[in-house]
Image: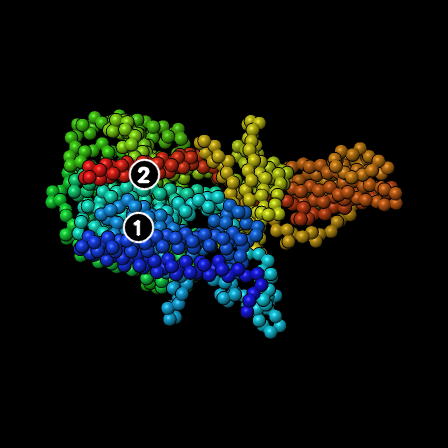
Amino acid sequence: MPYTGEQLLPGQIGTFLSIVSFVASLLATVAYFKATQSQLPSQQQSWKRIARGAFLAEIIAVIGIFVTLYFIISNHRFEYKYAWQHSNYQLPMQYILSCFWEGQEGSFLLWSFWHCILGGIIILREKKWEAPVMVTISFMQFALATMVIGIYFFDFKIGSNPFVLMRDQGMLSPEQFPIGFDSQGHLRSDYLSFIRDGNGLNPLLQNYWMVIHPPVLFLGFASTIVPFAFAIAGLWKKDFGGWVLPARPWAIFSAGILGLGIMMGAAWAYESLTFGGYWAWDPVENASLVPWLIAICGIHTLIAYKHTGHSLRATFLFFILQHLLIIYSTFLTRSGILGDTSVHAFTDLGMNAQLLTFLLIFVVPSFVLLGMRYKQIPTVAKEEVISAREFWLFVGSLLFFISALFIIGKTSLPVVNKIFGTKYAPAEDIEYSYNKVLILFSFVIAILTAISQYLKYKQTAGAAFIKSIWLPTLIALVASLSISIWGDINYNKYGVGYLAAIHLSIFASVYAVVANAFYIFTGIKGKMIKAGASIAHVGFGLTLLGILISASKKEVLSWNTSGIMVNFGEQSQENPAENLTLVKGVATDMGKYMVTYQGDSTHPSDPKQYFKIHFKYKNKDEGFTLYPDAFVNFKGNEGIMANPDSKHYLHKDVFTYITSLPNKEKNRDTSSFKDHKLQPGDTVFYSQGFMVLDKVGRNITRKNIPYEATDSVFAASLTIYAKDSSKYTAEPMLILRGNNIMPVADTVISQSLILAFKGADADGINLGVKESNSVLEYVTLKAYQFPAINVLWLGILVMTFGFLLASWNHIQKNRKAELKKV
């Protein structure tokens, strides 16, 4: 049956290209495998030509899938399930890309796209290692292609096709979509005209960070395949050391981009989520952090091997684990197993068996191959000297490795519970359960980051070491003591022991910054092209310092001074004492500020509601305005989904978000006026105080009242005295226009009062008094101050630059080495 308005061609093209990608990646894998195994150069070249052609077809197919799906989403083709699930007409165009990777299928395609780019570079740049490395990359592409092909093998579903139609997925039924069916229960041919809009993008993803963060993060994920593939190729071909130099720039690049992607996610969390920070030890955050930690282990043991021959076995292990943990994180975040413990996890698409197969098909062969070759991997019989750089590189790598095991162990509790039927629960204070352990590791690692480059490989003379390190040590000690003493670092929530660990770690992080900055000029004589490692270490120290100061000096500003306590419900983690309710137009005390809720606004094309919050310093005539926003009752779900707003200073951030709003539906005005007969000087009591009628006259002080020159206008001037010692004035009015009497009420919003001047006679005026919650316009606000938060963001940028500079330097070294061979 033809259906009016459907465009089937894009879906058919996309499905065809998915099949092409599936077949081409499999063919490339087989052809590269044959090229690797072939002994004759002519056969190798023949298989390589086939493999390259297949991989080129793979690249074209993946890009074609990407473009086709983007076309469907951006044109709101709601006959397709993926477009309906993730987009709608109101969505701003800049967030269309976010729709693409909101779903699992789109994120798999993004991952595959980056593999195409990286694989293409390997084909162009690597000669000796092209075939064995591309076997692994092509097979990874084949595995990803199965995730989006969406076919059935007997009763087993392989992948989830993003080009399926709504009507083919059981999403359009007479019960769910009655308007789209005729009296016979058949789907109408014009059903598409009744689908008015799509489901839309998750409000929390409608942020510019979610346009740029996923591509960078998935580039980091994808790039881990390259050092992994080199390590597997080295084991496979028994060339245990030859792969190290070509893999080194890739490993450093991967660590830099993965770290940047992770911290872009932290920036998104800081700007879009309301837990009051940038890192909450969420399982999905942890699952991406652990591979980065392992990557750092691999880079440092690789460097040790390059200079001394030590730690090659560890290097193999770390680069294999790095990529396997990326796949494991994919299983954790996409299987639905973290649904109760993470706000980031994808929903379960019924692909758990396939995801587990995806994991095992890489884990088992990798460790079998490593086990088979383990004893053949060359080692240095001589023990490392304790004064040698390689010894401390290995110790630092070991500390990173133990940290990674600790984090992934705690993160994997839901998996343990699932397998063994246990009921291990996360710690009540999740952040502290991680921080109390990792702060000790960070102290030692930062110290090693400071001193390791001053050590020589194989052995270091003690006098020379002390001579080179004493000045940066002294400067770091003075600087860190200054921060600790005058920076008011007195975080005592967890006792003196934890506070001492913070101060020690502040010294260690400052030490890492100062010592590595010194080394750029004393160790490598200011040659910036060689300074990548030192610059990355400086960035690491700054990052750690920013974390320590911003977390230990994070300050709640919004202590409740208004006396209005909001009930957030039993499930909420909000503390009413830390949330300040602001009545519209009333300046309220908030520490060094007077804060006023000045109003709110919406836009027809934007479902968010923006709230104008003005901060004014008490001691100076300056201030700033913030606009936190919220989705109110989004898609019929009662409540708010808030997005923070921050005021950025060089040395701190003021961070705010809305935690509660009045429910306009529940607070409909059902109360009535109570009439009182008053003479000037008389008093009327209400629930929150009393009011006095001062006078009645024709001297009008209220502005913007619509009366005409021929009207007779009378005003009742009243003073309201509240229980909290506040005093207000009100001026209800009475307009006589011909035979018509028109009362003009006045309101005292903060007291929920409506006052109406209803008439007058010889006994006095008739004043109507009504107390109504519908009058009260307010927001409840949470506000923090984050000192030195910019030190953290600066550290991330510096560290990323250092990684990229080091990677580029090693690329240039490899090119020079190749030219010498020629």
Query: Vertical placement of 420 versus 511: above or below?
Result: below
The local secondary structure at tag 2 comes to helix
Q: Residue at x 31, y 42 (%)?
A: 253
- When asked about the image quadrant of residue 187, the answer is bottom right
The numbered dot on residue 803 is 2
> Farthest residue toward the bottom?
184
Q: Residue at x 18, y 33 (%)?
A: 456
Res 126 visible? yes
Q: Residue 395 in the image: state x and y as whole percent.
A: 22, 42
Res 577 visible? no
Q: Is residue 626 left or right of residue 239?
A: right
Q: Residue at x 36, y 59 (%)?
A: 22
Decide which of tag 1 and tag 2 comes sooner along the chain: 1
Quarter holding the C terminus is: top left
Q: Residue 319 in the image: state x and y as whole percent.
A: 26, 49
Query: Vertical placement of 478 versus 318: above or below?
Result: above
Q: Name the foreground residue: 719 vs 118.
A: 118
Residue type marked 2: Phe
Q: Which residue is denoted by mark 1 in the rendering?
A: 225
Q: Name the foreground residue: 322 vs 196.
A: 196
Q: Residue 31 in the image: state x and y as whole percent.
A: 27, 57
Measured Cα–Cα span from mark 1 to mark 2? 18 Å
- When asked about the image quadrant of residue 509, the answer is top left
